[in-house]
Every structure is written in structure tokens, then in C-alpha cells.
Image (spheres, rainbow, N blue to C red):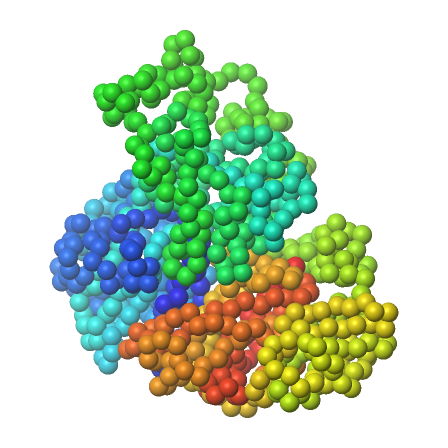
Amino acid sequence: MFRLGYRFFFVVACVFALSWSMGACSGGGNDSDGSTTQDGGNNSNPDTPAGNSNNTPPDQRNNPGDQTSSGNWPPPNGMAAMEFVVDDSANKSYGPGELLWNGSFVYNKDDNTVKFSAAWQPTDGPFPPLYDDGPIDQGGHEPVGSKAGDHIWGIVVFVKPDDTQDLEFEYGLINTSNHWLWEGPNGLVTVKKGSTEVMKAKGQTLQPHGNIDIKVTLDLSKLQEDFAIDDVKNPPLLFIKGTMTNWAHVQVQDRGQRGDDKEGDGIVTFVQSKNLDYSKHFGLLQHEREVQFVYQFNSMTGREYKDVDDNALPNGVQAWADCNGDGKFTDDEKQTIVMKKDSRGAVQNTAVIVCEGKEPPCSKADCSKDRCKDKPICKGCTGDSDCGQDQTCNTSTGQCEAKQGGCTKNDCGEDRCKNDPVCKCQSNGDCKAGETCNTSTGQCEAAKKCTSDSDCAQDETCNVQSGQCLQKGCTSNDCSLDRCKSDPICTADGPVIYFVTPGVGPVGGGTTITISGDRFKSGAKVMFGNTAATNVKVDSATKITCDTPAGTGTVDVTVTNSDGKSGTYPQAFKYGGGGPNPGQASVDWCNIQWPKMIPDTNNNIPDAQVGQPSPVIYGWVFKTGVTDKPGQGPGIKAEVGIGPVGSNPATNKDWKWWPATYLGDKAGIGNPTANDEYKGTVTPAKAGTYNYAYRFTGDGTNWWYCTTAGNDKNTPYDPAKATSLTAR
């Protein structure tokens, strides 16, 4: 089953493929909010389901070698039971109701039962909360043999088995902020047909915090060329997210604060110890822990620092770890930036292995060792970094003492300074991710979600699905605005092409095409590759119609005005086949597997960017006797596209399509290779909101269109169930 991760992640929407594809859904690795462990399914093969591995579950109170056990309490007649445990006894940071067992099921708290559900985003559900109130046979909710109050959280739920086939449930772990906590492949638990046994779902242990600080920087003068910034001293908003932040966004700045070495040097900095006040679940890091991370530009839904294949970029990235525990980041503690696969094993993130190959820092327990006797932790403090936030080091006594006197920007995380004028915010850039600055009070407040354009600024529009205010698309009247100066409508003085529809036609030519854009002039000529179109008609400054010439392959489309100025849409038209035929289905079923919308702030899915590949879009397809065999189903072709909101891509010619590539086999009912998964991106030419869809063909001519709801051969595409994408 597909899982977004990074990464890591992300929680995804899944759809039940009727009788063929009862694959469960994956969770979102890129949105995790806790560190996981040896029991969470981590192994050398990220495609191996955690439920099929031999790792020992964290609940050592039961038989660790057996996934089935006969409990000493009876489930209801005819029902099986599933139990799940998460161990937080090391950090003790989670409380009642803060952990949820997220999976391909819906939970009914009234009778404590679950039923299969293919869609299991955090916003789906409901999902079972985890308890620390004792065993179910003694009035609690945890597995038999559990102990209340030990910070080992658990749940036992009931499920009605199927009499004809096994039921497979995929699962993960989220918190009440909808952040994905599970690392590694999705968990998998199977209820055998007709079984009334107690099934033990593989659990997870949250790793204890360590004592190692890390520092990660991004040199804005060394960004990959597609992300180049003209003025590195006045950069856009930048955020970092990763396993060290539990995939929460933390704003990074170049202000000489929170561990940044020098204000205005064009290097933005993140230091773990300076951000522990962000969440009670944050902590310093374990020795040799793998830390993955990704940068994000402009906003929490903005463009991620990744290449066209969705892999994170290492250009300009450096990292250090305080391996000797002296509170400094020295040259010999510089970490190697490596590329590591995300939790679903599909793409790579930038990462470091904390202090790999070096001895861990000294702790109080190590003070008798020669290597630790002279360390500050064993001698007393030698500087303020050895003391708490509200303390300063008296170097003559080696004692930490309470701070006295005024506050500085570096003290704003301390309770004594939170209301000091120096700590008041002046703009949103002074606040954490998800907050805005109330300039009248100087306080950072949780950002409110918009419900209409009236809730947004004049140059913004409300994306009601995400609750985000997004900047409006640029027009020629907006070119004096900073945000529009680099928009194609403002940088080009010739024609601009936004859409070429349809985007496919026969090699013999003769397909009537509509070109949408701006600055078209009477007498304009149109070229498909190196061949001129016929019957060109300039209907207006924003619309041209013409007929395609004969051709092969995929070609650029260029409009040239009578004054010689031109504009080109790269790879705009594909020759081959007869174009989409919406009349017949040549596959049995298809769907958009993930994401459910773009942007999606709950799952850290950013906006699409004009002229850039969108976040990766995943689709599944099933065809009897074709996709249900190992490997790519022969004859299957896939494309992902965008078009006008509320339109039907099967009949509307304004849709634009891009090829999708085969990714792998995905499970269905009784067959681990029933479905084929594809991935692709779209490249919006103009800011705005669109619908996006997948289409598949099994014969090269007849296309079948699908949404996240899933479409079998008897269920055509329904615009009312369409998925939205916002580009800016």
C-alpha cells in the first residue's frame, strides 16, 4: 500500500476498489510528530509491511513471538479482537487522548468496534484513541495484562470477521494534531476468515530523547539554480521540517537569534536546543540517530526544496552536531549530509546520522570515566550553555544561578521574558509556523482559517478546503506589485500561453485546438514543433483556435505575433492515438490514490507553483489479467491532468495532460499485486484553482477518468467528487 513519506509522509487518502482492490491506505510519513523505533517497522526493506516482519512488539508482557493469543476475556460472540500498544515510558510526554490508532478502519466508540474503510486520512475516521487506564478485563481499554499509569498506551477493539476471506488492515499512528508519528512501512494486521482470536498488531516504542544538539543551515547563495534568490539578505519565509521536529514546520531565519551565527549573512539556521519550547514532544537527539529533513519556501504550503523527481536537494545544506557536549559546534563536529529514503521508500530526503562514528557525549553517569572527568557536566558549569534557560553560569563557583536583569531576543523563550517589549512580535515573520502576529498586542496567535475571500487581504483569495489565504494570480494590471514582477505575464512583452487543449491528437493532424493565454494579436501564427498550424483564428487577445498539422512525438507550441514577438508552451501537444475516447472503459477500475487536494496543510502538501512541477500525484489502476500479475501491466498507459473547476475531463477540451510513470504493484483483495501504481506531476501555466484527475487506458485509445472516490467501469467520472489544486 502506498504511503507518503518523505516522506516520511504524509497521510494519504485511499479508495476501495470494489471487489478488486481492497487495499488499505497509507499514512503520511512526512507529517510525523514523534520519533519511532525498533518496534515501529523500521527495516532495511522499506517496502516490507511491518506486520510481516519478525521485529518484537514493544508489549513484552505478552508472548513476543506470537501475533495471536487467546485472551482471558471473551470478545462479543462471533467477533475477533485486535490490540495495539505504543510505549512512551521513556519520555512520558503524551497524555490521555493524544495518541490515535490511525488505520484503514472506522471506529465506533459506542460498541468499541472497527469496520474496514479505504480512506484513512486524519480527517477521515474516527479512529480509536489510546489509553493508559489498565487492562480491558478489569474495566480499562488496554490489552489483558497491561498496567495503568505506566505510559504504555494501548487499545483493544472488536471486528467482525469475514466468512469467505481474510481481512487485512493497514495502520499507523497519529496525534490529535493529525501529525503522523509512525516511521517505516505501514503496519499490517490480518483477521483470518471466520476467526474469533485476539490479533496483536505490531506496536511501536517512541525513542527516548538524547543529549545531543544539532545545527542545520542553508546557504541561500548556494541554492540549486531553480531556487536561486536575487537578494539573499531579504529572503522569503523559510521553514524546516523533519524527524527532529516531528515533521512540524519551524521557521528558520537569518537574524542572529535562536542559534543563528550572524544576522544578514544569507545563511538561515536551525538549532534543536533553541526550539525545544516549540512542543513538549521535542527533545535533544540520540547518538547515531538518523535525522531526515526538508526545507520549504514562502509558507507551510509553499514549494519544497526538492527536484523534479520529488527528492530533497542538498545544495547549500550543512549540519553540525555537538558530539562532545561542550555546547559548541566546531569544524570537527560537522556532519555529512546524506540522502535517505523516506518512510515509504519512494523518494529521498536530506539527512544526517548524528555523531556517526564518534563517542557519545558524556552524561552524569560517565563522570568516573577518564574521557569525561574534565567535561562541564562533571566539573560544573563553565558557561551559560551549561545551565537552564532561566539561569546563568557563575564561573567562579561552577554553579548555575537564576538570571537577573533585562531580557534580550535570545531570552524570549523564557517565561520571565515572554511579555517583555523586546519579545513582542512586529510581523508574521516573528512568529512560529501556524501563527500570525497581532500587532496591536505584540502577541503571536494561532492563525485563523478563512471561509471566504472576505477573510483575506485584497490581493488574496480563500482556498476553503485548506482554510488558507492564497495570493491571487497575476494579471497585466498587477505588474507593479513585487509578487508579480517575475510572473510570465509581466516578464514577457510578447504573447503568453496558459493552456493548449486538447493536448493529444492523431499523427495525421486535423485536431482543432484552443490556445488560451494573453497578448495574442491579429495575424498571429502558430507552430507545432517546426510545422505551422492551419486555419489559425485569433478570436481575442486571450484565445486562438487552429488545426494541428501532421506530426509525431510530443512538441512545443509557439505563438508568434505579427510584430515578431513570440511565446512558447514546452511539450504542449502529443501526437499518437486518436486522443481520449470517453465512451468506453478499457480498464476495470482506477483512482487518485493521493493527495486528496493540493495544498493540504494537514498533510504538509504544498501549493503547486506556476511553471513548476506540482507535488507528486499518485494513481492506481486495476485490469483483470493485466495488472494483477507481478510488474507493470502490459498495454497500460497513465496520464495526470488539470482543467477548469467543475468540468468533466472526458468531454471538456480545456484539460491539459502529462504522462505518469509506473511505480510498483499494490495489493488488492486476495492478491498482493492486484493494482499498479503510477506517479506524475502537472505544471500549471497560470495561477488559480483547478481540478485534477488521473486517466488510464488499456488499449491505447479508450481512456477512463478517475477521482479520489474511485471509478469502476460502471462509475464514470463525477465532477462533484473532483479534487482541487491551487497554483500560485
The residue sitting at the top extreme is 396
- Front-most of residues 191 and 386: 386
- Front-most of residues 511 and 432: 511
* For residue 244, side relative to residue 79 (left or right): right
- Residue found at x 45% / y 81%: 636
* For residue 179, side relative to residue 716 (left or right): left
- Residue found at x 33% / y 48%: 36
- Residue found at x 58% / y 47%: 223
- Residue found at x 80% / y 82%: 537
Where's residue 112, x and y in %?
Answer: 30, 63
Where's residue 348, x and y in %?
Answer: 43, 55
When the figure is inspected, residue 590 is found, relative to residue 220, above or below; the finding is: below
When the figure is inspected, residue 78 is found, relative to residue 322, above or below; the finding is: below
Quadrant, the N terminus = bottom left
When the figure is inspected, residue 276 is found, relative to residue 241, above or below; the finding is: above
Q: Quadrant of residue 6?
A: bottom left
Where's residue 149, x and y in %?
Answer: 26, 43
* For residue 118, side relative to residue 86 (left or right): right
Q: Quadrant of residue 238?
A: top right
The residue sitting at the front extreme is 530
* For residue 582, side relative to residue 512 (left or right): left
For the question of whether residue 213 can be seen, the reply is: no
